[in-house]
Image: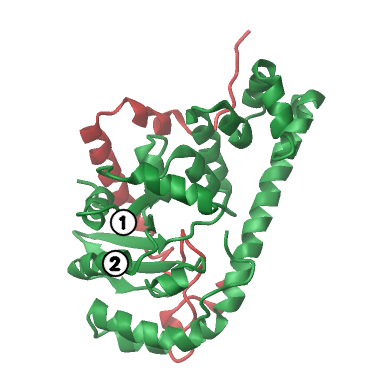
Chain colours: A green, B red
Amino acid sequence: MSIYLELTRKFNHGRTRAILAGGQAVVLHRLAIMSKDGDWILREESESTEYVLSILEEYGARYRFGAPLDVRWLAGGWSSHLEFQRQGMRVRTDFVTRPPRLDEDSLQRVWRGAEGQDVPFLGAVELANMKKTNREKDYAVIGELARKMSDVDDQLLHSRSARDLIGLVEQYPDRARRLAEKRPVLAMIGQGREALEAALDAERRRLIRTNEERLGRYLDASRPWAAMWPSLSRQMEELTLSAAHRLMVCQAETGLPFLVPGGWP
Amino acid sequence: MTEFRDEFLSEEDLDLQNLTDEELEAVWTAWLYQAQITNDEDRYTYSHGVFTHEPVDEANPESGPLKDKLP
């Protein structure tokens, strides 16, 4: 069984705590295999973070540089990163409770949809929003995800294809007009394919810059923590994961702020 | 005239849709093993979340990422 299916099932034993996101969710949408690391959206409750930590301890995981797996930091949009080796494979497990670009309403919908699923994984719309990163390759994934969206409005809001958008607008002109305020690119459709393609490129670059600025805010806020990390990391090496976690939390309380202004969503 | 479609992913990628669940898991796991060859390259970098690089260990700079690679 894929390690990511195995972990997701274990994290969700007894109740829904973790939703598989990112590249591994793209695999479950059967679009591409393009990431070797796993990331999950966790329920923002101490029971969830403690349970997941206990599972990872069974695998011999250790912390990488990041925030402690603790809701006080995760609620501020921080991410936690752990890693272990399993049968010759390096397995990275990354966690957030506040995924970027998903607001409270979207998150609540995501959790309602995940409830009771064998392997909860992020749906196409939310995954497309999370994929608006500073990596070019993610926009190719968004392009294909948009084609899997059942709702025409969602397709209009996420499609990366000028041809697809022109076709959609021919069929649903009123919807495109209504959504143009939310996605200004749609207002360019009447100006032809070339203008629309240029607008899509500009939109992608704008999204990339926006994400870089967001990451920059977290980078600035984590500088004191980064300075503390090498020494802390050495102290954590000989500890069990739960003991390392307690030490990390204690140190992070002075080195890593809970909130980053302008950080989430 | 041929009708073109904007392509984002390769035919090989999109062929995942034709696999059974068991075949998908086998291909997925094989891919993950193959991808281990880049572990050294991405040892200090992140693919998710708000962190991008592991910090430099000033006491032991050889053990961490090069400073000039930090953002």
* Left-right relation of B49 to A132: left
Using the rendered image of the protein, determine whether residue B71 is visible from the camera's viewpoint. Answer: no
Q: In this view, does A189 lie above or below A128?
A: above
Q: How far apart are marks 2 and 1 (CA)?
A: 9 Å
Q: Are marks 2 and 1 in contact (CB under 8 Å)?
A: yes
Q: At x 49% / y 57%, what residue is drawn?
A: A99
Q: Which mark is residue A114?
A: none
Q: Seen from this angle, which residue lies furthest top? A: B1
Q: At x 64% / y 66%, what residue is drawn?
A: A262
Q: Nearer the viewer, residue A244 or A260?
A: A260
* Left-right relation of A19 to A126: left
Q: At x 37% / y 59%, what residue is drawn?
A: A43
Number of other residues with Cα within 10 Å of mark 2, as a class: few under 14, some 14 to 19, many 20 or more: few
Residue where numbered disc 2 is placed: A47
Whole-percent x, y for residue A155 in the image:
57, 30
Residue where numbered disc 1 is placed: A17
Whole-percent x, y for residue A150 in the image:
49, 27
Chain containing the residue with disc 1: A
Q: Going from the N terminus, do you reach mark 2 or mark 1 first?
A: 1
SS state under label 2: helix
- Numbered-mark total: 2
Q: Which of B35 and A227 is in front in this view?
A: A227
Using the rendered image of the protein, determine whether residue A212 is visible from the camera's viewpoint. Answer: yes
